[in-house]
Image (spheres, rainbow, N blue to C red):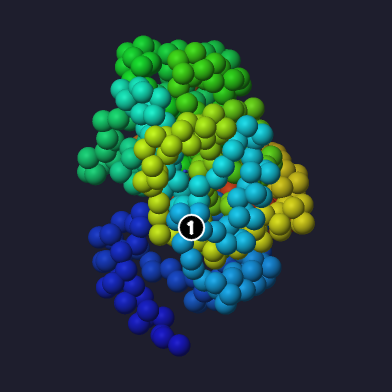
Amino acid sequence: MLRNDQLAEWDRENFFHPSTHLAQFARGEAPSRIITGAKGCHIEDREGNKHLDAFAGLYCVNVGYGRTEIAEAIAKQAHELAYYHAYVGHGTEASITLAKMVLDRAPDHMSKVYFGQSGSDANETNIKLIWYYNNILGRPEKKKIISRWRGYHGSGLMTGSLTGLELFHKKFDLPLAQVVHTEAPYYFRRDDLDMTEEQFTRHCVQKLEELIEREGADTIAAFVGEPVLGTGGLVPPPAGYWAAIQEVLAKHDILLVADEVVTGFGRLGSMMGSDHYDMKPDLITIAKGLTSAYAPLSGSIVSDKMWKVLEQGTDEYGVIGHGWTYSAHPIGAAAGVANLKLLDHLNLIQNNREVGAYLNSAMRDALDDHANVGDIRGEGMLCAVEFVKNRDGRVFFDAADKIGPQVAAALAARGVIGRAMPQGDILGFAPPFCLTRAEADEVVSKTVQAVDAVL
Ligand code: PLP
């Protein structure tokens, strides 16, 4: 086995890490973290340190680590057929079975699923399908996509543009011109503190209507949104938000994409976030929870309404020119089938609902009165704690204070991993669904210690 210092040196010399401060890492100011194993909700590093991973990797290891059922399904698939493509009607038992399992769990009006590799490429697929759809319908000018500030939809050219977080635009010449952003449905950060939640929903709707009016409804193809804002701060929508937004979209014949990369397959305590908020999307993006990250696989679930037009398009123009080498990769599909079975067999969504509610209420009991805690919010197995300099009048810290990262580091030093969300001083939790009440208690008690150490 390689020595730790050798591995760390190779790491710094050769490995371009995503979402990392490159210069600090190269100078050795940020540690090289080498993870060697994991079981349940815990991960272990090369030094033998164990951490309770209360963010499930990047909120993706939903069924927890070390599930032999999934590992065995992957190994069996790799032995029998590691790869064959899905072009021109090819499939495998795993990919066909998974497509059926996904549609069985999606809202009734959905029709087909297109498999990709990552959440980003699934969203790229969605935008291409939307453009194709409007071209087939003879309205080539209806192409702009609306997304929300603080939305996260990926890191590609189009998906990085849809993402409404400055970090992902800065110095990359994004967003692209076809994307326009609207108000984030973030009640805690509303400008007018006197607004009720219902008034704030009406304010978001009014902002959307103004944007549509300004751009022209005949130029706008779709609205993309996560049922609950994820990377932008783990923010459930204000009361009545999705019903009111959908009314506006229907009025202007604008398609709805529900980006369920985080919320799909149980994270909110319902099978899909679309069901949770009574959304009727035209496309649903799925990834992380589809395989619980045991293998990379994503999907775009297409509605009946869109599917009919896509079919019509191929009758007019021939084969649809969109495919990835790894579409419906058999190993990813086998992981997906085993993962969705496990969710059912172990009743993990129900556990998620119960323990998620317990975690949220315990966090509120422990920190609601803290002078520097402005908001504690969550839904299902998502929980966020937002820090403020002063609760009265809601005064935020300066970004340079890095309060969120400091609290996350203090928490990690105590053996629990949360995530400092990239914009604002927000500590996020999205544990695996198998979290126990005792583990939830540990997350809360160590968070209190970490907050007290920093603030
Ligand atoms: N959409 C949402 C809502 C996400 O949270 C993410 C990733 O966190 C993505 C899309 C992009 O997925 P990926 O990182 O697999 O490309």
Secondary structure at numbered mark 1? loop
Is residue 222 visible in this depiction of the protein?
A: yes
- Identify residue type, mark 1: Ala
The residue lying at 71 percent from left, 47 percent from top is 349
Q: Position of residue 411 (x, y in %)?
A: 53, 55
Q: Position of residue 70 (x, y in %)?
A: 64, 66
The residue lying at 35 percent from left, 22 percent from top is 139
Q: Is residue 339 toward the left or the right of residue 211 in the image?
A: right
Q: Height in image: 163 above or below 117?
A: above
Q: Height in image: 136 above or below 5?
A: above
The residue lying at 46 percent from left, 62 percent from top is 85
Q: Position of residue 62 (x, y in %)?
A: 62, 54
Looking at the image, which is closer to me, 107 or 247?
A: 107
- The crowding category of the residue bearing disc 1, from other C-alpha atoms within 10 Å (few below 14, some 14 to 19, many at least 20), is some
Residue bearing mark 1: 86
The residue lying at 40 percent from left, 25 percent from top is 137
